[in-house]
Amino acid sequence: MIYCVRAFSNYCNLRGIIYVLVVVNHRTPALHWQW
């Protein structure tokens, strides 16, 4: 994640955050209500 942000700056940072949130929400539905 850190390498991704350094390499692609805002584009990768935005997509990385969205990807992580989606994966976390799918794996642990309880966290969906916290966002």
Image (cartoon, rainbow, N blue to C red):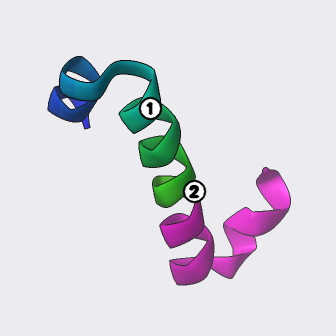
Relative to 31, residue 26 above or below: below
Relative to 10, residue 26 above or below: below
Going by the image, does 12 lie left or right of 30? left
Going by the image, does 33 lie left or right of 31? right
- Mark nearer the N terminus (1 vs 2): 1
Circles 1 and 2 in contact, beta carbons < 8 Å: no
Please name the residue that numbered disc 1 is placed on: 11
Estimate the spatial distance between the alpha carbons at disc 1 and disc 2, rounded to whole Å. Answer: 16 Å
Label at residue 22: none
Residue 18's x, y, as percent?
Answer: 56, 51
Q: Nearer the viewer, mark 1 or mark 2?
A: 1
Task: Determine the residue located farthest toward the right in the rendered image.
Answer: 33
Mark 1 belongs to which amino acid?
Answer: Tyr
- Residue 17 located within the stretch drawn in magenta: no
> To which quarter of the image does residue 21 belong?
bottom right
Residue 15's x, y, as percent?
Answer: 48, 46
Disc 2 is placed on an element classified as: helix
The crowding category of the residue bearing disc 1, from other C-alpha atoms within 10 Å (few below 14, some 14 to 19, many at least 20), is few
Residue 24's x, y, as percent?
Answer: 52, 66
- Residue 23 located within the stretch drawn in magenta: yes
Relative to 35, residue 32 above or below: below
Q: Main secondary structure of the magenta part?
A: helix
**Nearer the observer, 5 or 32:** 5
Going by the image, does 17 lie left or right of 2? right
Marker count (numbered): 2
> To which quarter of the image does residue 9 belong?
top left
Q: What quarter of the picture does the N terminus occupy? A: top left
Residue 32's x, y, as percent?
Answer: 75, 66
Mark 2 belongs to which amino acid?
Answer: Leu
Q: Give the magenta-colored segment's residue range.
A: 22-35
Please name the residue that numbered disc 2 is placed on: 21
Going by the image, does 3 lie left or right of 17? left
